[in-house]
Every structure is written in structure tokens, then in C-alpha cells.
Image (cartoon, rainbow, N blue to C red):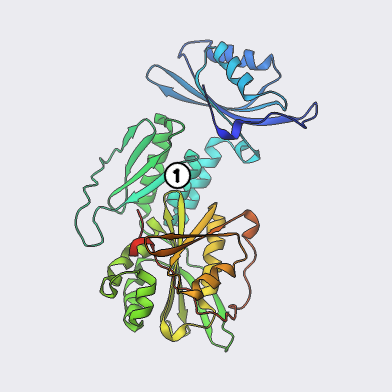
Amino acid sequence: PRESAGAEHDGEGETAGETALWRMRTTVKDEPGSLAVLCTALARHGVDILTLQTHPLADGTVDELLLRAPAGFQAAELTRETAAAGGSDTWLERADAHDLVDAPTRVLGLATRTALDAAELPLALRQLLGRCTIHSLPATTLTGRPTGENTPVEGVLDGTVMKLRDPSGGAITIERHYLPFTPTEFARARALVELDARLGPRIPRSQDVLTLPEGNEITVRRAGLDDLEAARAMHDRCGDRTLSLRYHGPVGDADRYLAHLLSPRYGRTLAVQTASGRLVALGHLLWDGDETEVALLVEDAWQRRGIGSELLERLVALAVEAGCESVYAVTQSSNTGMVAAMRGLGLPLDYQIEEGTLVVTARLTAADARPRPARARDAEQTPTRAGTRAGRPRRH
């Protein structure tokens, strides 16, 4: 039997009458009465089954149950009683009130989020499938060479790994080492990806108009592939040092990353434009498997006006909304402005030197989703110019 780390509770300090929620998966024989035997065994110990989903297999059925058990009832006892009732390959973890939402309602909610914003697909898949690692692998490299990712239209399911054809080309690989995927989960994930493919590229069109300390108005909005030419024009107006600090590589290679960075498949992008409509800054929140990266670029003429700090705060708020536990930024140790901007977030920070660059990681909590200020902050430091590790998007 397998028990997750979240299932290790000793019950100390819990009073009589208190209950705890558990999520349990177990495999039972596909024959009449097998589920009834399990329900009876649990009921003898005061364990209530709140919801039940069945995942048919070729030689049995995986039952997924949400249980309310006496607070002192231990994971080992649940596993032992389940095994005695005919359950095998049992997996347990503590649940919370969010798990009380039934599966159809949860799936419909995830489909709605995906329909409104293409960047939500990886997040929706993670919420659908639980703790898992998701990688979007493009069909071609940044230099245009094929990557060899040719996933069949119907996808591939192999135990703890599934592959789905990415609507934008390439493949979406999902891994969940602690629990094999069932055919039912595979079908649900594939349906979400097919919905994304049918709707095509889309991003929310909301925007905020802010006033800089010197009185200029700027607009902050979501950006996408439609902004590719404007982003290239901004690159042309940036100096070599600005581009070098941002991309950590040859300045001439900067443009080739833009299509990747602006794609909603790999994360969310915020753009800053002037009253005349000129694009002057970009901020990226990039999904990187289990990690999340923040990256910024501010045009030379618009630096030192608080734009970088404003974008960084907004990206962190998006990361909190997406349920990310941390975000990291990659810069150079000489870029004191970037380090100061990360410190200005007021979050716990970790520092690491990696491949000659400084990686600054900020740990997030739900309390960090605070209201946005009415004005862009007047930052004294140079606006942040974060880069991706090794000078290019990591594993996106």
C-alpha cells in the first residue's frame, strides 16, 4: 500500500467527535458486491463516503473516494481495512474542503477557465490530475529545427506518463510518479486539450491605465502573438546592454525567443504601452514544469520609472492566482536593480549561483495576492531586466 507524505498524521491534540477528510484510491475486483464489501468495512469504523468516482480498468475498477473519518483514525488503519475488504494498490492523502466539489462541476469550471484564456490549459490539467509535472515541448527548436516530438492524435497513456498532441504543435507531457493515470483521467485531459485546439489562440482583453510619478499614463495589459512585431520593434530600440542583461546571450539572437515567450502555451505575458500605443516593456510568467519563472524587459528610454517593479508585482500576483508556490528570476550579480526589485516584493528569498548567473527565488503564499496599487510605484533602483536560465526559455 502507498501513502502520500500528506497522510502522515498522528492525531495528537484532536478531540473526540472531530473528523478529517481523506482522498483514497483503491483497486477492487470488477464483480457484483465488491464495492458494498468495502463500504461496509469502512462504515464499521464510522467512516462516511462523501463522493465516489469509478475508473474502469481491463481487469478491475479503480474507486476514488472522498472520506470523512474520525480524526483519530489513522492512514494505516484505513489502508488495512481497505485491504481486508479486497482493495489493493491503495493510495491515501489528506483532503480539504475544495475536494467537496464533485467531479463534473470541477471539470466544467476548468473547461470555462481554459475557454477564456489559452494560458490556463497547463494549470487546468494540473488541477484536474493533482500533483503532476507538465512540460510543453514545441515541434521545432528556436532555430526552426524539428524536435522529433510527433505525438499521435489520440495521445499516449503509459502508467504514470501521458502524452497529448499540443494544439500549437509539439506535445504536452504529463508525469505523476506517485499514482498511475487511469483511462478516465486520460480521456478528461484529452478533452480539455481538444477544447483548447478548437477555440484557437485567445487571451483576456482587460487592461489597466496607470500614471507614472512624472505624470505619463501607461497601459498594462495581457500580450500574445499578435504583439510579435511590436515586441521586435521594441528590441530594435533597446541597447545592447539591455538585451544582454535580459537574454544572457548574443544580442542578435534576442528576436528568435519572442514567439516562444509571447505564446500563451508557455505562460502569461504582460505588456506596457504608452498613450500613443507604443510597446515599451514586457513581463513574462513562464511555466517551467514544477517551477515558474519571471522575466522582464523595459525599453531603455522608459527605465527608472517604476515600470519594472510594477510588472514584477503583477506577475507575482498572477503566480499566486495560479497556485504557484514560488517564482524565480535569473539575472547577473552585478544587476543590483533586479536584486533590489525582488527584495522589494517583501517575500522570503533564496539566492543561488547557477551557470554563472544569479537565480533569485521568491516563495509565495496566498496572502501575497494583495490588491493592486492605483499608481505605478516610484522605484529608486534600475527597473528589473530578468533573463531566462542559460539565455533561453527553460524546458518550455
**Image quarter in which the C terminus is found:** bottom left
Where's residue 163, x and y in %? 33, 40
Q: Nearer the viewer, residue 116 or 66?
A: 66
Secondary structure category for the residue under label 1:
helix
Vertical arrangement, residue 113 with respect to residue 108, above or below: below
Where's residue 144, x and y in %? 20, 60
Vertical arrangement, residue 272 with respect to residue 37, above or below: below
Q: Is residue 294 something one can see in this rendering?
A: yes
Outermost residue toward the right in this view: 16
Q: Amino acid at mark 1?
A: Leu
Where's residue 269, x and y in %? 44, 65
Q: Is residue 110 left or right of residue 156?
A: right
Q: Count of labels shown?
A: 1
Q: Is residue 370 left or right of residue 270?
A: right
Q: Nearer the viewer, residue 379 or 170?
A: 379
Outermost residue toward the left in this view: 145
Task: Identify the residue shown where x is 46% and y is 74%.
Answer: 335
Outermost residue toward the bottom in this view: 214
Quarter of the view holding residue 334? bottom left
Vertical arrangement, residue 175 with respect to residue 281, above or below: above
Vertical arrangement, residue 316 with respect to residue 252, above or below: above
Q: Which residue is mark 1?
A: 125
